[in-house]
Image: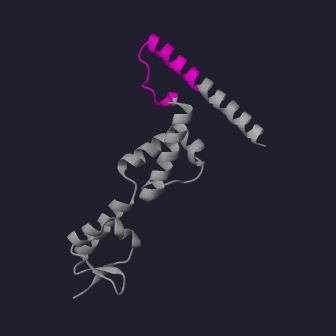
Amino acid sequence: MSIYTINDSETKFCAAAMHQCGGRWNGVRSVWMFGSIADAADAALELYRATRATIGMREELQSMIDDSTAVAAWNYDETSLFDLDTLSFAEAKAMVAAGRQVRRLLGVHPLEDVPSTSAEDATAADLREQAFEARARRSQRSRGRHSASAA
């Protein structure tokens, strides 16, 4: 009989799932042991699910990349490769929090608005965009004054 193991400290986030998949904790070797490869595979999937960014997080991070919040929030460089699927839950959580903070500071970005369907909507969208840009300029000036007074 073969024994299949998972040795990952992140299993602390899904210990119940490890047990449900037939896993037994080996405290001597600090590994989860499984009697079949299918049980070990199911447990590995549960480990991945519990420790990776959720679909909602990945969608929100992608919207931050699309509307340039990512550049201000976490120094995102659009010329480098970036795979949202490889982010851990903790990394994604920190990036989402930073992006939300930047959005609160600058207001809702005009690119997130629903596309206009009439001339009145287009005028309203233009006004929203102008207001957004004015808020961004004001916050940049006030940050400049604060950093100059701190120096």
In which quadrant of the rendered image does the N terminus lie? bottom left
Q: Main secondary structure of the magenta part?
A: helix
- Left or right: residue 110 compared with residue 57: right
Residue at point 52% right, 30% down? 107
Instruction: Please tell me whether residue 28 is drawn above or below residue 53 in the rendered image.
Output: below
Q: Quadrant of residue 37?
A: bottom left
Q: Is residue 41 magenta?
A: no
Residue at point 45% right, 15% down? 121
Residue at point 58% right, 46% down? 78
Magenta span of residues:
110-132
In which quadrant of the rendered image does the C terminus lie? top right
> Residue 124: horizontal and vertical position, in percent?
49, 15
Q: Nearer the viewer, residue 148 or 69?
A: 148
- Left or right: residue 140 compared with residue 64: right
> Residue 142: horizontal and vertical position, in percent?
68, 32
Count the marks: how many?
Answer: 0
In the displayed image of the protein, which residue is found farthest to the front?
A: 150
In the displayed image of the protein, which residue is found farthest to the top?
A: 120
> Residue 141: horizontal and vertical position, in percent?
70, 30
> Residue 84: horizontal and vertical position, in percent?
45, 53
Instruction: Please tell me whether residue 70 is drawn above or below residue 126 in the rendered image.
Output: below
